[in-house]
Image (cartoon, rainbow, N blue to C red):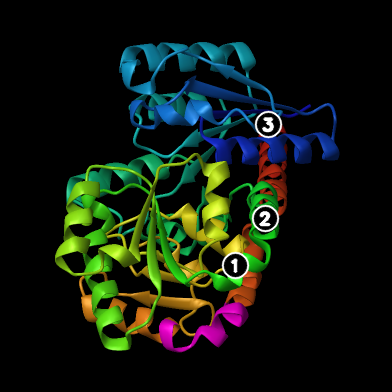
Amino acid sequence: MMRVLIVHNQLWAHYKSKLFHEIDRAIQWADPADELLVAQIALYEASRKVMQNDDTITYDYPYQVLFERSLDQVSFRERREALFRIFNEYQPDVLNITGYFDWAQVLLMFYARRKGVKVVISSESSSVDHNRSGWKETIKKVIVGRANAFFCFGKTSAEYLESLGVVKSAIKVRNAAVIDEQVIRQRYDDAKKELGNNANAVSKKFVYVGRLAPEKNLNTLMLAFAQTLKKTGSDWQLLFVGGGPEKDNLEQLAADSGIAGKVIFAGGFPWYQVPGWLAQSDVLVLPSKSEPWGLVVNEAMVCGLPVIVSETCGCADDLVRDGVNGFTFDHMQQADLEKHLTWFVQNPDRIAGMGQESLKLIAPFASGPVAAQMAEAYRELAAKRWEA
C-alpha cells in the first residue's frame, strides 16, 4: 500500500483543490488500497481572505487543516512542529512539499530523506519572476539536490530547476499549472447563452483580470490602449476585472488620456464569476512586469480567447505562440504592446480562429491528465523505496 503526503499552504486555493481532487481519483483508480493525505497548513493567506467565499464549488479529497487561521498568523515553530507531527503520524512513502521557500517544509524534507521517504518538490519559480542573488541560488541548489522528483508549472520553471543542477529525468511533470477547466468553460458557455444575440451589438473588448497593482504594469496597458484608439479611431473598450490600490490612479490616467468612456472598471469577483466577464470580452491582456505563471491566461484560453502576454510571465513560453493564438511582448516597450492591440483592432476576423488555437495549446494542461502523471510519479517513487 502506498501512502502519499502532500504539504500545501492554504485550504482556500481552489485550483490546487481541483488538482488534489484529481490526484486522489487517479490514485484510487489505480489501486484503492493506496492513500493520499493533503496537510493544509492554514485556511488562507491574509491577502487572499476573500477566497473563503469560494464555497459554491466543493472538491472531495482527504485533507487535514493544521491551523484554523491565516497562514500569516502561523509561526515557523508552529509550522515545523505540526508538519513533523503529521508526518510521523501518517508515515508516508512519498512526501510532496510546496516549493523551497518555507524552511519548515525544507526541514521536513531533510527529515523525510533520513527516514528513507521519497520527496517531490512542486515548483512554480522561474528565472524571470524575481531578482536572484548568488547565495540564495547556492542554498536552493543544496535543497533541490535532496529531492527525488519535481513537478513544474511549465517550461520556464523546469528550465530554472535545470539551471540549479536538477537532471531532466527528475522533472516528472512539466505542465502542472492547471485550473478547473470544466467549471470555467461551463460558466463561460452559460454566460454566452445569456448574452445571446446582444453579444453582436456590444463593442469588442480587451480584458485584464487580476489585481490592480503596480507590478501588473497597467499604466502601460492604459497608455497603449489610448494610443491604439487614437491611431485607429475604433470603438473597442478596455475592461478591468479586479480591485486594488491602483484603481484611482488608473481612472485618472484614463480621464487624462481622454478615453474614460472606453474604459470599464468592473471591480473584483471570485474566480468562478470571472468567466461571465470573459464571455463579454474578445482578447485577454496580461501585461505584468513579472508573474511566476499567470493562471488567468489558462482561464481565457479554456474559453477560446486569444491572449497578449508579457514575456516575463511564466506561462508565455508554454501557452503563447506569436501570430497563432496571440502575441508576447516586452513589458518595458509600450510601442510593442500598442502594435499587438492595433493588430486585433484591425483584424477582428482573426479572433475566432486564434481562439481555437488557444484551445489546442491549453489542452495539455487539463487537470485530469496532469493529476494522472503525478499519481504515476508517486507510484514509481514508492516502488523504488520498497525496493531499497
Mark 2 or mark 3, which has the lower sequence index? 3
Q: Residues within 10 Å of mark 1 (few under 14, many from 20)?
A: some
The circle on residue 59 is 3
The residue pinned by badge 2 equals: 194
Q: Count neighbours of disc 3 (C-alpha within 10 A) and say few if under 14, some if 14 to 19, many if 20 or more.
A: some
- What is the crowding at mark 2: few (fewer than 14 residues within 10 Å), some, or many (at least 20)? few
Rendered position, 158 above or below 108: below
Q: CA distance from mark 2 to mark 1?
A: 9 Å
Residue 119 rendering spot, x and y as whole percentages: 54, 36
Front-lying residue, 130 or 377: 130
Q: Where residue 152 appears, x then y in whole percent?
A: 50, 52
* Residue kind at label 1, given as amino acid type: Ala
Taking the spot 55% from the left edge, 44% from the top edge, the residue there is: 273
Number of the label disc, if any, that sits on residue 199? 1
Amino acid type indicated by mark 3: Tyr
Left or right: residue 198 compared with residue 78: right
Q: Which mark is first along the chain, 1 or 3?
A: 3
Task: Kindly state the secondary structure of the residue where label 3 is placed.
Answer: loop
